[in-house]
Amino acid sequence: MNERNLKVRISYCGTAYHGFQRQNNAITVQEVLEDRLSRLTDEQVKINGCSRTDAGVHAREYFFSFRTCSRIPCNNIIRGMNSLLPGDIAVSGCEEVTPDFHARYSCIGKEYRYHILNSPTRDPFLEKRVFHYPYKADADIMNSAAAQIVGTHDFSSFCGSLGVKEDPVRTVTVCNVSRRGDIITVIVRGDGFLYNMVRIIVGTLIYVNEGKIAHDSVKGIIESKDRSLAGVTAEACGLYLERVFYKE
Amino acid sequence: MNERNLKVRISYCGTAYHGFQRQNNAITVQEVLEDRLSRLTDEQVKINGCSRTDAGVHAREYFFSFRTCSRIPCNNIIRGMNSLLPGDIAVSGCEEVTPDFHARYSCIGKEYRYHILNSPTRDPFLEKRVFHYPYKADADIMNSAAAQIVGTHDFSSFCGSLGVKEDPVRTVTVCNVSRRGDIITVIVRGDGFLYNMVRIIVGTLIYVNEGKIAHDSVKGIIESKDRSLAGVTAEACGLYLERVFYKE
């Protein structure tokens, strides 16, 4: 019987998980998905996710792919998985794709959003879903700094120490900051991201807001390739993988 | 030293709590608040909440009052409480009020909202914060039924069995149903509510949607004073105490 290659679209609230990728001694989204898929298909399923995400990071859209000999129709995989999965993970799509498709290697771009609650009081309904920043914040200044991120650069200054072996050149096509009420949102879109890159970009924009980094010096920080000149790594809980792009 | 009477405004996500009111053997919002206030004021604090809420019910606005000999300024109570409280409860206001004020007995009205996620797939970010209803729903039909709730009535048909000793006459000034995208919201405002009244109203509106109750028969159900003619008690997780009204 022919193996099928399936592409599955999910979303998850990352609060309870130690990131996407399977680990020893810590519960991850991948482990939960593989466990439920194995039960559903009666096979030992191994999935390929489109991205690692850190502990506590969320995904509004995420894709994984896997090979299976099971003949279960795609719609029944969606329904079956949603009845087996915990409430903080949901399957919203499943389709058969060509054998060469791989959720990670076929991906041509991603969009992340980082949400900052900028209010004196925290919001009990946004606990662990936004970064609460109770101080004065100027989204326009942050946005003028964010604009310097756009382009094809060596982003070594914005790479966490666990990612330094990667090729550090990435193309960022969108990087902007806007405010809607008490929520400041940073949108970053690009062809790929280094380890912790979005969180370090956000930490740098917060330093710009606080005057610790001059708003026109971000270009120089990129050119320096010196991680110590950028800001802190912002908390994981405000970060969402928002969209994942594939060639079609 | 004179005792002060303080009115405190909070909000809370009710998922982790067994309702507002203190109970033996179950964690409640009242217990957590009294514990933190007692630590902050170095007194044995007893608070009066504006309402009981069921296990899992949320509050976007909630008031309690308490008497204290402590001289801590109101702003410091807000700040101090927010640093002591868990992230799912937040204090947003505190003011000194006249000695006769009582958060429950001085209350002249309340507004509840009930949120229904009406989509085929659940939303991981709304788990335990909305009632997920994946079937076809007609907000207009539900709204035409809801309109019959408005008025001063004996609401015995909409009272849970634990509340049958109360005076069953209440005045409902607003009862409507509207849709925004996948979210159907039921808004109910009145001078007071019987035990489980809003949840039974919502369960009845869902029965109307499903054709189990005719959309024009709600008035008759009220007149019958027969709980068995109304719908089921809708799940707690969709219910929010939204606003609390006092004479000013």
Image (cartoon, coloured by chain):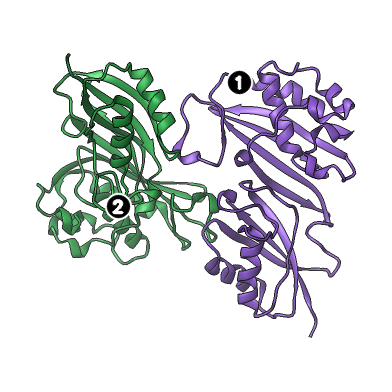
Chain colours: A green, B purple
Q: Nearer the viewer, residue B202 or B5?
A: B202
Chain letter of the residue carrying label 2: A
Residues at marks 1 and 2, CA–CA distance in whole angstroms: 40 Å
Give the quarter of the figure containing the C terminus of chain B: bottom right
Q: Residue furthest front?
A: A42
Q: Nearer the viewer, residue B90 or A37?
A: A37
Closer mark to the observer between disc 1 and disc 2: 2
Q: Residue at x 24, y 40 (%)?
A: A51
Give residue A167's position: percent from left, percent from top.
9, 47
* Residues at marks 1 and 2 touching, judged by CB atoms closer than 8 Å: no
Q: Residue furthest top?
A: A1
Please indicate, yes or no, whether residue A211 appears anywhere in the rendered image: yes
Chain letter of the residue carrying label 1: B
Residue A150 is left or right of residue A61, and the answer is left
Q: Quarter of the image holding residue B135?
A: top right
Residue pointed to by mark 1: B137
Q: Residue at x 64, y 49 (%)?
A: B59
Q: Nearer the viewer, residue B9 or B18?
A: B18
Q: Amino acid at mark 1?
A: Ala
Q: Nearer the viewer, residue A223 or A91?
A: A91
Q: Residue at x 31, y 18 (%)?
A: A72
Q: Is residue B70 above or below residue B5?
A: below
Tag on residue A26? 2
Q: Amino acid at mark 2?
A: Ala
Crowding near the residue tagged with mark 1, few <14, some 14–19, many ≥20 C-alpha atoms within 10 Å? some
Q: Residue at x 33, y 45 (%)?
A: A176
Give residue A130's position: percent from left, percent from top.
43, 51
Q: Is residue B168 above or below residue B146?
A: below
Crowding near the residue tagged with mark 2, few <14, some 14–19, many ≥20 C-alpha atoms within 10 Å? few
Q: Residue furthest bottom?
A: B1
